[in-house]
Amino acid sequence: MLPAAGSAGPAAGDWPLHNGNLASTRAAAGSGISAATVGRLEVAWRLPFTSPSGLEGIFASTPLVVGGRVYALDLNSRLYAADLRTGLLLWTRSSHARNSGPNGIGYAGGRVFGTTDTTAYAVDAETGRQLWARRLASRTEQFIEVAPVSADGRVYLSTVGFPPGGRGALYALDAVTGRIVWRFDTIKGPWARPQAGGGGAWYPASVDADGRVYVGTANPGPWGGTPALPNGAAYAGPALYTDSLLVLDGRTGKLLWHDQVTPHDVRDYDFQDSPILASVQRGGRSVSVVIGAGKAGRVIAWDRATHRRLWDVEVGVHRNDRGPLPRKAVEVCPGLLGGVETPMAYAAGRVFVPVVNLCTRESAVSNAPLGTLDVTKGTGELVALDAATGRRLWRRVLPQPVFGCATVAGDVVFTSTFDGRSWGFRTSDGKLVWQARARAGSNSCPAVAGDTLLVGAGTGHPAHPQPVRELIAYRLR
């Protein structure tokens, strides 16, 4: 029996989805970790990632915890199952398919749902035995980079598209058979020119109590432009539905409403983070909201009933980030790997936003490859916002980019920075109450299960000349 949509939180001690629950709040249920106890966290075990590491490292998603087992999917599409208490490896499943990430998995009804770079699949959570597999990638839908989400007997995921010709699409698959229930093309109409591409999603969907599916979409490309096609001329017009919040009927895939955050994006400003579903108090009444963010460094809240924007707040450093780019290169902030790169968290009326301050030089006629950026030159922030108004409550500056999501346990919000450090701040005022350092860099997201904090350290970093790539379990003494 698969769980129904709208299950606001996981069972106590479980973390069954990339963002913890269908509302994508990334807040743990029933954890013993708090500002009063967090100082008692110590390493309980370490599980090594044994696959070869690539440019993005070997682990860039969130581990799951269900029924006393930990599940993790690395960037070579190898799936691990381990015992939560001991870290003992129970089984692995190898697909030998490199994925640039963030990648990831979801759990429902005794099944673990995962992907390779081309194919979605389900395995038996007890044994790792494959139950079904469905290839989704094609000439125009080049990759799958998203963690699946299961609700109402369906599995929601996405392909992504890249230039030339790519058109990312959203999918609902039957959770039992893998059959395609529906497909939604995130590019409205044909591209203006064959050089264009983009769309799709690379962080998981959220699902409300009525089965509506909320997704943030990726950018059009090529960003910047060329001398012949400056400022995104390959994709004339707003390039719907890129850089948008989309809300679909989970049963049929019909588009119910949408809002494009960056029309005709020329800076690679995906609105990619998983939308948070919450209720806030405004004007003495409860309002159901959806809160999204992305690489433009903007956090936006909508009223789910009226579809009206309630607030729109910039976080991090902003410079030359609106309108067309000049032909001569200028410093753009947020840059290509800046802004709100990874999912936010929500708890007790507050939104916790991980921020990357990393600028790049961009122009209307050039296209800087992502692989050439030195992300160690950036810094990070963790920002707390009032979910009802967007007002900034506190801000903490961090020495390295925050490529880990925000994750809440009790009155502590955790995140991780690229140099492998994990941080815990008190949710009320941002006071630092805990930190630890891994033996490798980190571009993955923490999870919390009961008295255990799980942190991945799976990438290289100059601070770690001989990185030890592993999943670390910190547990209360």
Image (cartoon, rainbow, N blue to C red):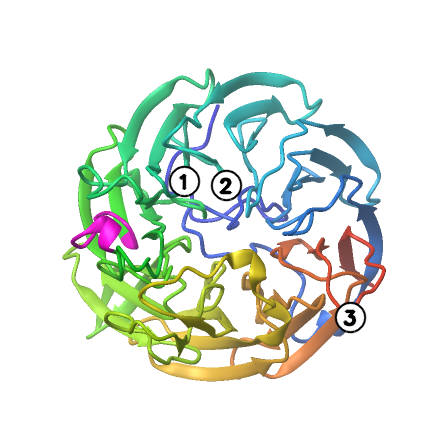
Residue 8 falls left or right of residue 263? right
Q: Nearer the viewer, residue 5 or 72?
A: 72
Residue 209, relative to residue 414: is it above or below? above
Quadrant in which residue 68 is drawn:
top right
Q: Main secondary structure of the magenta part?
A: loop
Q: Nearer the viewer, residue 367 or 69?
A: 367
Was residue 235 drawn as part of the magenta stretch in this picture? yes
Read off the residue under disc 2: 145
Q: Are dots 1 and 3 in contact, CB under 8 Å?
A: no
Residue at the spot 75% in from the left edge and 30% down from the top edge: 92
Q: Are dots 1 and 2 in contact, CB under 8 Å?
A: yes
Over which residues does the magenta segment extend? 233-244
Residue 303 visible to an observer of this rendering = yes
Q: Which mark is residue 463?
A: 3
Q: Earlier in the sequence, mark 1 or mark 3?
A: 1
Read off the residue under disc 1: 160
State the separation of the CA atoms marked 1 and 2.
7 Å
Was residue 397 drawn as part of the magenta stretch in this picture? no
State the separation of the CA atoms marked 3 and 2.
28 Å
Disc 1 residue type?
A: Val
Residue 224, relative to residue 140: is it above or below? below
Dot 1 lies on which element? loop
Q: Where residue 239 sits: x, y (%)?
A: 22, 50
Quadrant in which residue 123 is drawn:
top right
Q: Earlier in the sequence, mark 3 or mark 2?
A: 2
State the separation of the CA atoms marked 1 and 3.
33 Å
Disc 1 crowd rating (10 Å Cα; few below 14, some 14-19, many 20+) is many
Residue 257 falls left or right of residue 444? left
